[in-house]
Amino acid sequence: MFSCDRCGECCRHVNLSQLYCGLDRGDGICRYLQGNLCSIYETRPLLCRVDESYELFFKDKMKREDYYNRNKRMCEKFKKYNR
């Protein structure tokens, strides 16, 4: 399972991806982000579900560890972006 520290940074940059831009409330932040948490977590879009997205879209393209590492690298970039 992907390890998430619940910082909310991925949800503060949805405008940087065409896949997530529909979630943008107009300022780059996901319309469902409250504090650092998703207000619709149990029913969040599939693309917001790291493990399920891997199984459906990426498992034939890369190893799970590589997929997690890519997600982690983006997470770290988002954290640095706001510093």
Image (spheres, rainbow, N blue to C red):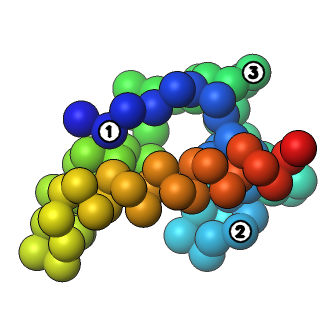
- Residue in the image at 32% along x and 38% along y: 2
Q: Are marks 2 and 3 in contact (CB under 8 Å)?
A: no
- Residue sitting nearer the eye, 5 or 58: 5
Q: Residue furthest left?
A: 60
Mark 2, residue position: 16
Mark 1, residue position: 2
Q: Quadrant of the N terminus?
A: top left
- Residue in the image at 18% along x and 78% along y: 61
Mark 2 element type: helix
Tell whether 44 sits left or right of 75: left
* Distance CA(mark 3)–CA(mark 1): 21 Å
Tell whether 44 sits left or right of 54: right
Residue 4 can be seen in this image = yes
- Amino acid type of disc 1? Phe
Q: Nearer the viewer, mark 3 or mark 1?
A: 1
Q: Position of residue 76 (x, y in %)?
A: 62, 49
- Amino acid type of disc 3? Gly
Give the mark nearer the N terminus: 1 vs 2. Answer: 1
* Distance CA(mark 2)–CA(mark 3): 20 Å
Q: Position of residue 3 (x, y in %)?
A: 38, 32
